[in-house]
Image (cartoon, helix red, strand yellow):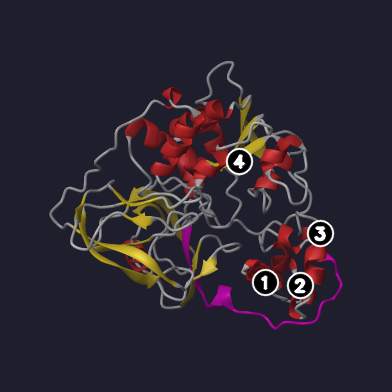
Amino acid sequence: MNLPFRLQSFRHGVHPDDHKQGTEHLVVEHMPFVGRYVLPLGQGGKPAKPTVTRGQRVRRGERIATADGFVSTSLHAPVDGTIVDLGRHRHPNGDLVDCIEIEADAFSLQTIVPHATVDPDTLDVDNFVAHVQQGGIVGLGGAAFPAHVKYKTPAEKPVRHFVLNGCECEPFLTCDHRTMVERPAEVLRGARIIAKKLGATDIHIGVEHNKPDAIAALRAQVLPGEAIHVTPLEVKYPQGAEKMLIKALFGQEVPAGKLPLDVGCVVNNVGTMVAIADWFDRGIPLIERVVTVSGPGVRRPANVRVPLGTPVRDLLAHCAGTVPETREFVMGGPMMGSSLASIDVPVLKGTSGVLAFTAAETARGNEFGCLKCGRCLDACANFLNPSVLARLSRHGEFDALEANFVMDCMECGACSFTCPSNIPIVQLIRVAKSAIRDQKRKEKKP
């Protein structure tokens, strides 16, 4: 692949080792069905409302919970089975949350019962948005924001560019990479559906240049004369963040406090496009997703298509388990993912990876005082001052934090990664942002 002398990117950021060699060439395999599945009702926006009762039989692909409001999505059964519980179970974030538990039918062939397919061209915008919501589709890059919300755009903010994120800049993760290599036609089919409905004039797909096979696979699906551009980007973290991706592709800044839509862009993950194509063309809702299982603690790294609600313990067992030296499990990537207190929690719509790390990777160095070295400033892609934000957080200076734009922090962790004093900068910022949100909620209450 011929690369330009200087690949497009954004300013600042960091270059962690990508650790993708263990899974980037592994074809996606299917997770065998297990005995029980737990599905939290909140997997993208406001928790859904159950439409099933204890003891009810359900079919794979059947809707079992309906959206409760606009920023909410439906939930569907990942298997044929019986509803055995509507109660509270442990969420990967550690909370006890309302869930639907399904006992799988051990004698079922587990074939998907597809919903009626709909030609998107026959739907106006409102019905299109409602149909996407019914499919339970969320952003599959990790945040799990309800996809349909982005497609309801105000008339005064026209969409010029529909942008697909194929960067996958988090170390270890390769689920998007394999999706682009193995299902490029579906990626572009979903992109064409959404771009047409948004009225976008073109489609831009940003892919870090360490994925040449993905770039080639996507370009092979572009028809002559189509306004679809697959752009190789510099390998840098956090290249996949919406604002950074827009800066890399168009050289345009998204102003502080604004959204991509304010500069004429809508951004989606490539995996979300496959989900859109499956829903409209095959009538299959979001009931499974590709998860990368990797890390030094995993005996057999893999990319696995996993039914939602599958226990992490069973997923790890499918990958031959973990080595005795394993000390920590992370859901998502090592930069923005979260540590698991237990592996008896389910795979969610937003689960891009399950990583296992040994004592060698999880050892925490001693924390020292800030050296005023400025490395965190050079790392921050949003041009914040992370060291100041961390210091203000320690002292609970919430007004000063907001004055220093703490809410613009996307919590990517680049500051903590580069800090030579081992200061947990991003953790301090997360605590501060959470406290500010709590404070504002209390102020709104009568």
Name the residue beneath numbered marker 4. 267
Q: Amino acid at mark 4?
A: Val
Q: Amino acid at mark 2?
A: Phe
From this view, report whether residue 47 is shown above or below residue 136: below
Q: Residue at x 76, y 58 (%)?
A: 380
Q: Could you give the CA–CA distance between mark 1 and mark 3, rounded to whole angstroms?
A: 31 Å
Q: Could you give the CA–CA distance between mark 2 and mark 3, rounded to whole angstroms?
A: 24 Å
- Indicate which label's residue lies in the foreground, 4 or 2: 2
Q: Residues within 10 Å of mark 2 (few under 14, many from 20)?
A: some
Q: Amino acid at mark 1?
A: Gln
Q: Secondary structure at mark 3?
A: helix
The residue segment tinted magenta is 353-374
Badge 1 vs badge 2, beta-carbon distance below 8 Å: yes
Q: Secondary structure at mark 2?
A: helix
- Indicate which label's residue lies in the foreground, 2 or 3: 2
Q: Residues within 10 Å of mark 3 (few under 14, many from 20)?
A: many
- Indicate which label's residue lies in the foreground, 3 or 4: 4
